[in-house]
Amino acid sequence: MTQKKILVTGAMGQIGSELTEELRRRYGSENVVATDIRKPDGKLAESGPCDVLDVTDRAAVFTLIKKHEINTIYHMAAILSATGEKNPALCWNVNMNGSINIMDAAVELDLGTIIIPSSIAAFGPETPRFDTPQETILKPKTMYGVTKVCGELLGDYYVKNLGADIRGLRYPGIISSETLPGGGTTDYAVDIFYKAVEDGKYTCFVREDTMLPMMYMPDCIKATIDLAEADKENLLHCCEYNLSALSFTAANLTEEIKKHIPDFKVSYQPDFRQAIADTWPASIDDSAARQEWGWAPDWDLESTVKDMLEKLRARS
Ligand code: NAD
Ligand code: AKB
């Protein structure tokens, strides 16, 4: 079997940072090159090869892939929903042109598996809100969502017409304890833990009845690597697997945290991100992922909250 030589783009981000560590554990540190537009530092820089890479720089993408003899890519570089609404042109440029550069490299340099994440942001207000089906209406209202739908469709095109092996998941909001999220609408579901531990109070930027699909980082990493490792023959979809683990309201999350910190106080002051959250589903039907590559989450709300608080308290 050919040795995997893996490139992670956006490796300084919330998912890329933890994904890189797990990939290095599994495939050997020297075989996983962590890149970001920001200079990689800390644990990421100490534990294996790193480079600065702007994914919109096509020549730099091709040069780096050739230099490190890359055959597998986890493409995590992106601009998320809230930042994307503040700067839609940047969001389009990074998410579309960055992904096209990666997809072209996959074809022109004859690479192996490429993972390009999508998001629940691919859905919109016309999509069924509960148990959102795999095949459904995709009419997002954010620039971020538009780039996610275009990315899914383009990925399918490259797979069906150009022979690339591109796979993708519609991640829900990801909760994690290691790297802060980078400008999304679901960031409150991470911020709340830091504020609970540090201050005992939090002002939440969505209403208490806002219900969104979420997932704890260990499940996100497992799903991502499992999809990359799945037998291609079994995959009837490629770039758009629905993925589900948790669904809760902001109030449900507050109540669960209060079981550990009874005096924790949360007030709700919705800002522009409420309007984005209101266009996204509350829960997801991920039966295609379960059937085609054996997806099943390990973490529920109770275990996620307990683990998050233990990790953050140990550091405070
Ligand atoms: P993040 O914002 O935390 O990290 C993205 C990284 O990309 C950052 O480190 C940033 O510096 C880097 N970046 C930005 N522009 C770049 C460029 N031009 N070239 C190279 N790097 C650049 O994002 P994340 O949460 O880790 O998301 C990773 C992927 O997962 C994205 O495709 C995102 O849309 C998707 N996703 C994330 C979530 C979530 O809740 N975290 C949910 C759904 C989908
Ligand atoms: C965001 O809120 O933008 C992301 C996502 C759900 O894609 N966390």
Image (cartoon, grey):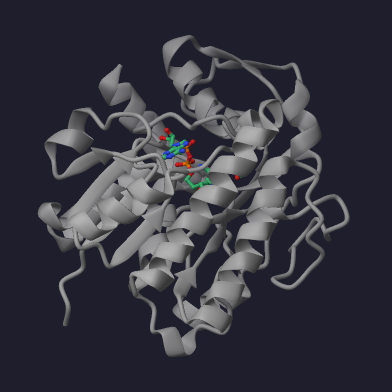
Against 293, is 26 above or below? above
Quadrant of the snapshot with the N terminus: bottom left
For image coordinates 75% across by 20% down, the residue present is 271
Q: Going by the picture, which residue comes out furthest to the bottom?
A: 233
Q: Going by the picture, which residue comes out furthest to the front?
A: 59
For image coordinates 41% across by 44% down, the residue present is 15
**Residue 223 shows in this picture:** no
Q: Which image quarter: residue 51?
A: top left
Spot occupied by residue 313 in the image (x, y as percentages of width and height): 33, 23
Against 315, is 3 above or below? below
Q: Going by the picture, which residue comes out furthest to the top?
A: 199
Q: Which image quarter: residue 212?
A: top right
Q: Which image quarter: residue 208?
A: top right
Spot occupied by residue 94 in the image (x, y as percentages of width and height): 54, 42
Spot occupied by residue 111 in the image (x, y as percentages of width and height): 33, 71
Number of on-image labels? 0
**Relative to the observer, which residue lies in front, 272 or 281?**
272
**Quadrant hosting ligand 2:** top right
For image coordinates 57% across by 62% down, the residue present is 243
For image coordinates 37% across by 49% down, the residue present is 59
**Residue 188 shows in this picture:** yes
Horizontal side, residue 7 vs residue 197: left or right:
left
Spot occupied by residue 316 in the image (x, y as percentages of width and height): 30, 16
Q: Going by the picture, which residue comes out furthest to the right?
A: 126
